[in-house]
Amino acid sequence: MSLGMMILTVVAVLVFCGLLQRVLDRMYLTDRAALLLIAAMVVGSLLPNVTLGPVSVNIGGALIPLGVCAYLFIRADEALERWRTLLGSVLTGAAVYGLSILLPAEAEALPIEPMLLYGIAAGAIAWLLGRSRRGAFICGVVGVMIADITTAVVNWMQGIDQQLILGGAGLADAVVVSGVLAVLLCELVGETVERMVRKRQTVKGGNHR
């Protein structure tokens, strides 16, 4: 089972058990909608890619996640969140592109899966900019796409005739993995910080009595 399939399976189980209700509420999704999206990505990843000239797009690994990003971006509460999300996507793209250059080409030579690093980078950037779960997903998905597009453009400028494949590995692609991991990381860090703040406030309140 691929890393992406494993992550989505875990997410589906958590959604089914009602353990991600707060996250889904913040992303304007119901349990049913989330499960349907996961199923759509699974089915879409098995369908042929949509090819337009030098660009090939996987339905489940890129088109559906990008559609979710568009939905979340439109539903953003305020303009500031949209600007933070756009900035976060660009910064995530730069971070992922930089990591892809610095890291060894052979994934086996790394102590950690590169896609995990991409997801962590996306989640950290999104949390620092606005602590938004919606923004985290968009940063993860769009950021990886920006990095892929940047790599393709650089190759084309160097005379390398290489097709740009977005989400080409389907559910195993960094687009899906980074988007989901970014949300989970943002939720984990956000919950941890919020509990620490509440605990500190409780201690201060007790000391003032």
Image (tube, rainbow, N blue to C red):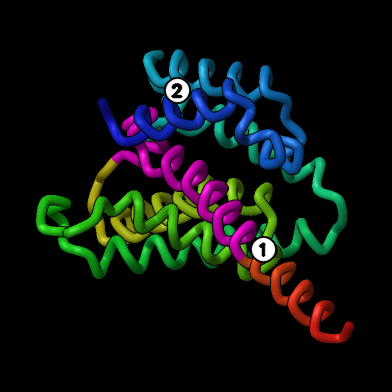
User: Mark 2 and mark 1: span between their CA atoms?
Assistant: 45 Å
Residue 41 % position (x, y):
49, 22
Amino acid residing under circle 2: Val
Please tell me which residue is depicted at 43% across the width and 53% down the height of the picture. 119
Amino acid residing under circle 1: Arg
Residue 16, placed above or below residue 76 = above
Front in this rendered view, residue 195 or 155:
195
Residue 163, placed above or below residue 117 = above
* Residue 33 belongs to magenta span: no
Q: Is residue 116 left or right of residue 15?
A: left
Image quadrant containing the C terminus: bottom right
Residue 69 % position (x, y):
64, 40
Provide the residue span drawn in magenta: 163-192
Residue 54 % position (x, y):
37, 36
The residue mark sitting in front, 2 or 1, is 1
> Overall secondary structure of the magenta stretch?
helix
Q: Is residue 84 left or right of residue 175?
A: right
Front in this rendered view, residue 34 or 139:
34
> Which label sits on residue 50?
2
Q: Residue 168: tell me if it is visible.
A: no
**SS type, badge 1:** helix
* Residue 181 belongs to magenta span: yes
Residue 3 % position (x, y):
31, 36
Please tell me which residue is depicted at 50% across the width and 31% down the height of the picture. 11
The residue at which mark 1 appears reads as 195
Front in this rendered view, residue 16 or 196:
196
**SS type, badge 2:** strand
Please tell me which residue is depicted at 55% across the width and 34% down the height of the picture. 65
Image quadrant containing the N terminus: top left
